[in-house]
Amino acid sequence: MNGNLSLHDLDRDGAIRETEAGLPTETRRDLLKGAAAGGAALGLLTTASPAHAATRGDVAILNYALVLEYLQSAFYTEAERRKALRTATAKQTARVLGAVERAHVSALERALGSAAVKRPFFDFRGTTEDEDAFIKTAVAFEDLGAAAYKGQAYRIESRPILQAAIAIHSVEARHAAWIRYLAGTTPASSAFDEPKSMSEVNRLVASTRFIVRRPATRSRRRPRFTG
C-alpha cells in the first residue's frame, strides 16, 4: 500500500478482523440494507467497563472507534495549529470539534487502558492548509464517524459501552449536520441514514492515504506537521 496503513494494519491480535468475521453474512447484509462529550455515558465508559472486564468483541470495537477518533482529533488539531483557515467560522469549527474529538480519544484510551491501539501517524496531504479542502474533508469525516458508530451499535454486548457509543454517535451526527451546513450541503438529505460496516469504513479510510507509517516531511527546510 505504498507505505500507508489501513485500520486493519493497526489491529492488535486480529481482534478487529475477528469481530468483523463473527457476524453472519445474512445479518450484515440485512443491516446494511435496512450533549456533551463529558456526559454520564462517557463516565460509564471509563469507570464501569474497563477493558479487562469487556468481551473481546467489545474491546475490538472500542479500538476500532479509537482509531477513527485519533483520525478526527488529529485532523482538527492540525488545522488549528497550522493557522491556515481564513474565516472565523472555520477556525471555530476546528477549535470546537477538535476539543470534542480529543475528549472522545481520552475517554476511549482510559476505558481500554493497556489494550488501546497506539496512535498512528497522519499526513493529511494539504487538507488542513486550505479552507475549502478542510471543510470538505470534515464533512466526509463526520459523516463517516456517525455511520461507523451506527454500524457497530448492535454488536456491542456491554450495556455501559453501548450507552457511551450511542452518546458519541449522536455527537458525531450533530457535528455532521453542523459541518454540512457550513459547506452549503443539506444537513439531512434523506429520512433514514445507513450504517457502514468495519470493512466499508476501513476501505474508505485506506483510500485517503491519511494514515502513514512515519511522519512525512515536505522538504529539508520545512518539516511538515502530521497529527
Image: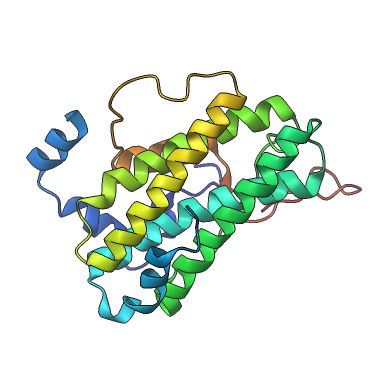
> Vertical placement of 6 versus 91: above or below?
below
Q: Residue at x 78, y 50 (%)?
A: 81
Q: How many marks?
A: 0
Instruction: Left or right? Give the position of 96 relative to 27.
Output: right
Percent of width and height locating residue 51: 34, 76
Percent of width and height locating residue 16: 30, 58
Q: Residue at x 27, y 50 (%)?
A: 152
Q: Quadrant of residue 29?
A: top left
Instruction: Left or right? Give the position of 76 relative to 27.
Output: right
Colouring rule applied to residues: rainbow
Q: Residue at x 38, y 54 (%)?
A: 167
Q: Residue at x 55, y 54 (%)?
A: 101
Which residue occupies the extreme right position in the image?
221
Choose between 110 and 213: the one closer to the eye.
Answer: 110
Can residue 196 be seen here? The reply is yes
Percent of width and height locating residue 25: 11, 41
Can residue 15 be seen here? The reply is no
Choose between 89 and 143: the one closer to the eye.
Answer: 89
> Vertical placement of 217 versus 208: above or below?
below
Percent of width and height locating residue 11: 38, 60
> Vertical placement of 130 versus 220: above or below?
above
